[in-house]
Amino acid sequence: MFTPVMFASILPEILILALAVILLCVEPFWKADQRRNAGWLTAGGLFAAIIVSLLFGQPGEPAAVFGNMIRFDWLGFFFKILFMFAAAVTALLLMDHEKVGQRGEAYLLLLASLLGMNLMAVSADLIMLYLAIETASIPLYILAGFLLADDRSTEAGFKYLLFGTLASTVMLYGFSLIFGFAGTTNIYQLAEMFVGGDISALLAFGVFALVIVGLGFKLAIVPFQFWAPDVYQGSPTPIAGFLSTASKAAGFAVAVRFFIVAFPSFAPSWTLIFAALAAITMTVGNLLAISQTNIKRLLAYSSIAHAGYALIGVVAFSQLGAASVVFYLAAYIATNLLAFGVVMAFSRVAGSDEITDYAGMSRRNPWLALMMLAAFLSLAGMPPFGGFVAKVFVFAAGVKANYTWLVIVGILNSIIGVYYYLNTMKYVYLYRMPNEDEENRPVSLTRPYAIALAILTIGVILVGTVFAPWFSWSDAAALNLF
Amino acid sequence: MNFPILSIITFLPMVAAVIMLMIPANRKTEVRGVALATATVDLLLSGWVYLQYLLGHLTGYQFVEQYDWLPALGISLKFGVDGMSAPLVLLTGIVMFTGVLISWGEYDEAHHLSAGIQDRPREFFAFLFLLAGGVFGVFVSLDLFMLFFFYEIAVFPMYLLIAIWGWVKTREYAAMKLTLYLFIGSVVSLVGALVMYWTQYQNTGILSFDMIQMESAGFSASFQYIWFLPVFIGFAVLGGMWPFHNWSPDGHVAAPTAVSMFHAGVLMKLGAFAALRVGVMLLPEGAKQWSWLIMAFAGIAVVYGAYIAFVQTDMKYMIGFSSVSHMGLVVLGVSTLNHNGLVGAGVQMFSHGVMTALFFAITGMIYDRSHTRQIPELGGIAKVMPFATIGFIIGGLVSMGMPGFSGFVAEFPIFMGVWGRQWMLAVVASISIIITAAYIMMNIRKVFFSPMPEEIQKHHIGDITMLDKIAIATLCFFMIIIGMFPSVMVPMVERGVENILRLLGGA
């Protein structure tokens, strides 16, 4: 029985799969110098898929489909749109990557990973969830190590693989324990099983710990963050951007659904765990970011810290909290992709990711410098960019939930953030190149970069100024959880 | 629906900033033209708002505009001015206009003069106007969320403006110090604001950031007692309140001239104004309980700032610390919580803004031509720059609180107000007037009227440009007119103060 609702619930995935098949059929017939067009195809196809999904795939009342494997609701839908957007932009950014852009399989792997993430956002069953996570992860292991001639990239791929498999194995163990206690793998039935309270708090704590290991790896929260800086630094820059945004957001989509829906009765204990993790994550991420000299490592630590801020919304355990997490991730995805996009565009010309090599950038390309400013100020949480509103919402949710201490930790951390983000911008705007003649060499942007960065910049400003529509969608997404 | 004049005043500079960024980088004249045109329009509009309020004998919040921005959380874009904020809107218009004039930065072949902004004027004016838009936004916002939104917009361009175009020796240090101080202050206040927001929700069931709404949120006395200090001091950091004033003189000195004018002239008012509007008006009980502490801090700032200004040898540091002293008077006036003190504080914010902008403008002009700001190294400026000299003397008279100038109109009520609360503090604080007179007059004698040292003669100092003169004349005009005819400002501020006193329970 294949009902229209079932069709609508996986419409984005059907479109992605179709796109992947088209890509697979077309790409071998292109000449080597045309292969780059696969990026246009992927990005264009994904934007089309977003539009089609928005038109025909909107969820109504939350529904369980495919034998309760998939939950068709606004939470999943909103995340799917975010992931597809992130993947489309990543495809554009990949196009002019010297060693990756010409390879059709990179785009294919990106789409495969996207498929997994989309399913992560809607999984209502532990088995489905585990499969989705693996589908999302395995292509990313390959993409991280895509630059075979580059030792760092190989290291990144291998490291990511080892940590990733370890974390997912631990999580799988946690899942199997849950099944053992509850007798069901369905997330929505778990809540009812545990309401009776015949599971001891200690046991629940152990299970949470196991699951948090797996999710914590995806979210790159402390103490599961070790892989992030090395992997980001080694992987191709657009892939690092994708890892730090969509992959992380997918982790949050799971965390929000899994913990809020399945374990409301244990909320006091897991919110406390998350509060502690959030505080440590923010602090460690920001403190380690200060001393970084490589911009990709700096962004890696900064994205660790941002996972900490977003966790405040999960800790709040309220509709506002969940909405603020979703909103935060939307703003963060646009912002961080913009930051990585600028890094990619600049390193293509400058051939370096060292922060000192950003000296004189505003003279070489004022527009690129402005976009970088927008991205970094948004990360620092300054208006009129998305980061400010997102932070205020998360903090507001934290204060409402009486986690004022956590909000104060968050605020102290954003001060550290302001320090190192502005310090980086100092190179861009203030310092001169050692040889000032070199400043006359412009940093030119190819068309895919110009398009991708312009979309992202406008997005970052729109999220930060006209925030009502984004918030009402986030709110609609959160509504389904409670 | 009325003509949305306050929105236009606020968003026009931001739109102009975007337009300027669209202009190719080498078309510097066009950039400056757009900047000047925008600043002129904004000055005229803010002047119009001011005159309407004054001549119409309006009271309460006027020109109110409201657009629902995020109804789910009670955030709305709500603008309006009252007797306290209308003069500050005008002040921002004045400083913006004169700031553009003195930053014009046309290279003068005849005198080998490179005054104003030569390097990347496009980015300079764009950031400056973004800042100006933020400042306008804070003064007109009646919504607490939007107030923070604009407040942060007014803070971060400061970093870039100082770090990029500032004085080479200290700019990086000063810019970072300033940004961190202000950011810490603002986020501390933000936590307070969020707590107020949810407490209001608990008390009344209304989910709103509207500040007029919050005035009747029924915060308990103990709540106000806890949260008044974080909120008030968080904002007052930007007002240069002792002991959190340290960023301010460093920032003044490192900043390029127009930014110093903005910084001392307008930004510090932003802090004092927000502290008054959010701290005192929304948490009046807290204000009453803590006013002794604020008063003590302000009293120290007034005397200490004046004394430190007295011993400076760098003109910009001197003016920077004199700003700490004069802003101390503003906070002192606020802390009295009585009619006289608050009226004086309101007028002082305007008067000091214009005066200190004038000081920084003239110091910048002297520095551009003589390449030094050290008072002992300067001399004989009066012969080559007579117009600037007159301007500086007028500013000096305002600074000393001489009758006939705006400084007197402002400071006299403040001291009356303080006398009403604690006469001993009034006596102590008035020492600052003597110290101020001393350093201003010594400075005028040495810099302007002593013989010109040979070092300086080498630079063949020429007179200031026409644009500089227009800027000086504009600033002097406002100081004199308020001094001569206090009725152009005082009644208006009094109407604003009545509202504050009503919230304070007719204290």
Image (tube, rainbow, N blue to C red):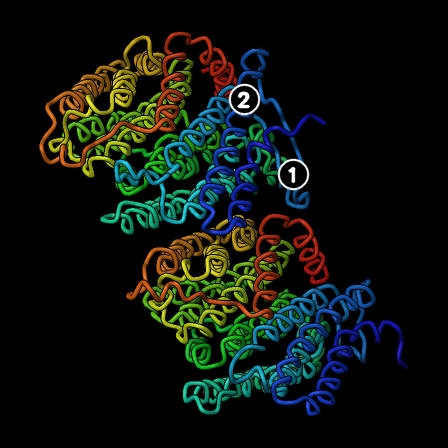
Rendering coords of residue A195 (x, y %): 67, 68
Q: Mark 2 belongs to which amino acid?
A: Asp
Q: Quadrant of the C terminus of chain B?
A: top left
Q: Which residue is mark 2?
A: B82
Q: Chain of mark 2?
A: B
SS category of the residue bearing label 1:
loop
Q: Chain of mark 1?
A: B
Q: Which mark is residue B205?
A: 1
Q: Residue furthest front?
A: B110
Q: Nearer the viewer, residue B177 or A482?
A: B177
Task: Classify mark 1: residues with Cα within 10 Å, few (<14), some (14-19) or many (20+).
Answer: few
Q: Nearer the viewer, residue B402 or B497?
A: B402
Rendering coords of residue B428 (x, y %): 21, 18
Q: Mark 1 belongs to which amino acid?
A: Gly
Check contact, mark 2 vs mark 1: CB within 8 A.
Answer: no
How far separated are the C-alphas under marks 2 and 1? 28 Å
- In this rendering, position of residue B311 left or right of residue A75: left
Q: Quadrant of residue B272?
A: top left
Task: Classify mark 2: residues with Cα within 10 Å, few (<14), some (14-19) or many (20+).
Answer: many
Q: Residue at x 45, y 50 (%)?
A: B26
Q: Quadrant of the N terminus of chain B?
A: top right
